[in-house]
Image (tube, grey):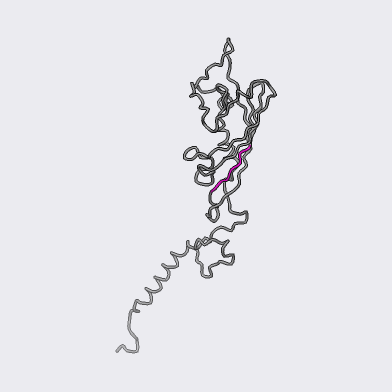
């Protein structure tokens, strides 16, 4: 059996007030702190909602025949660095999501049956989320929604020119930046070798004397 949900966790919601009458609806607004570590909301090392930052949730819980349908939006501020110029950046995040939490199967007496941890026959069954003792856990739903809403390659601005390939200078700070005597790094070593050979040839004395001095 799976561990029971803890109602004290910020992303666990109680549906008892909603009830099971199809058509019933409940609106919920809640602000939580973004987690960190392995549970961070974002794309590791690229862009994420910083640990401890506020995440504002606007939710609508609806009772349907199959379970509880949750529709919502998460508002937060994400941080990362530009993939072109490596400067820090911040962006406003609005992540929309919708998820069905199914009621557990009932036994012959109408009591919820314990779910087994055996592998499901298909991926759709394996990915199902359930109402457990009247509680639902939005954490996996919210994390997936945030990751999908974040850019895979964030930029500080759409036309960011990036960094100079020769010296690493940020081109946005100096649009006229250039190198007149720039040498392709792939040829720099060969050029140095050629100059060394030429210098060596100058230092080597020519063999033989002057014919006019021979007797």
Instruction: Name the spot of residue 135 as percent of width and height, x first.
Output: 56, 25
Q: Is residue 1 above or below residue 44?
A: above
Q: Quadrant of the C terminus?
A: bottom left
Q: Residue furthest left?
A: 215
Q: Is residue 129 above or below residue 188?
A: above
Q: Is residue 95 above or below residue 188?
A: above
Instruction: Tell me the magenta residue range.
Output: 73-79
Q: Residue at x 59, y 65 (%)?
A: 175
Q: How would you classify the magenta stretch by its main secondary structure? A: strand
Q: How many marks?
A: 0
Q: Residue at x 62, y 40 (%)?
A: 95
Q: Residue furthest top?
A: 108
Does the magenta run of residues contain 143? no
Determine which quarter of the picture holds residue 209: bottom left
Instruction: Name the spot of residue 26 as percent of width and height, x first.
Output: 66, 28
Does the magenta run of residues contain 75? yes
Q: Is residue 74 left or right of residue 4?
A: right
Instruction: Name the spot of residue 173 as percent of width and height, x first.
Output: 56, 63
Between 126 and 133, the residue placed more toward the observer is 133
Between 57 and 187, the residue placed more toward the observer is 57
Q: Residue at x 46, y 65 (%)?
A: 188
Instruction: Name the spot of residue 1 as percent of width and height, x first.
Output: 48, 21
């Amino acid at each position: 059996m799976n561990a029971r949900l803890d109602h004290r966790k910020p992303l666990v919601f109680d549906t008892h007030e909603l009830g099971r009458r199809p058509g019933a609806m409940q609106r919920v607004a809640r602000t939580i702190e973004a987690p960190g570590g392995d549970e961070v909301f974002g794309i590791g090392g690229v862009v994420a909602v910083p640990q401890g930052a506020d995440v504002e949730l606007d939710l609508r819980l609806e009772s349907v025949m199959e379970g509880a349908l949750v529709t919502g939006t998460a508002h937060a501020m994400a941080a990362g660095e530009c993939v072109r110029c490596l400067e820090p950046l911040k962006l406003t995040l609005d992540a929309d999501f919708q998820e069905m939490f199914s009621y557990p199967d009932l036994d012959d007496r109408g009591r919820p049956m314990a779910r087994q941890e055996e592998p499901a026959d298909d991926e759709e069954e394996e990915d199902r989320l359930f109402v457990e003792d009247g509680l639902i856990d939005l954490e996996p739903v919210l994390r997936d929604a945030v990751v999908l809403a974040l850019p895979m390659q964030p930029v500080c601005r759409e036309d960011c020119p990036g960094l100079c390939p020769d010296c690493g200078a940020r081109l946005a700070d100096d649009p006229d930046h250039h190198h007149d005597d720039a040498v392709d790094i792939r040829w720099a070593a060969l050029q140095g070798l050629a100059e060394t050979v030429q210098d060596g040839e100058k230092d080597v004395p020519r063999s033989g004397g002057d014919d006019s001095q021979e007797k």
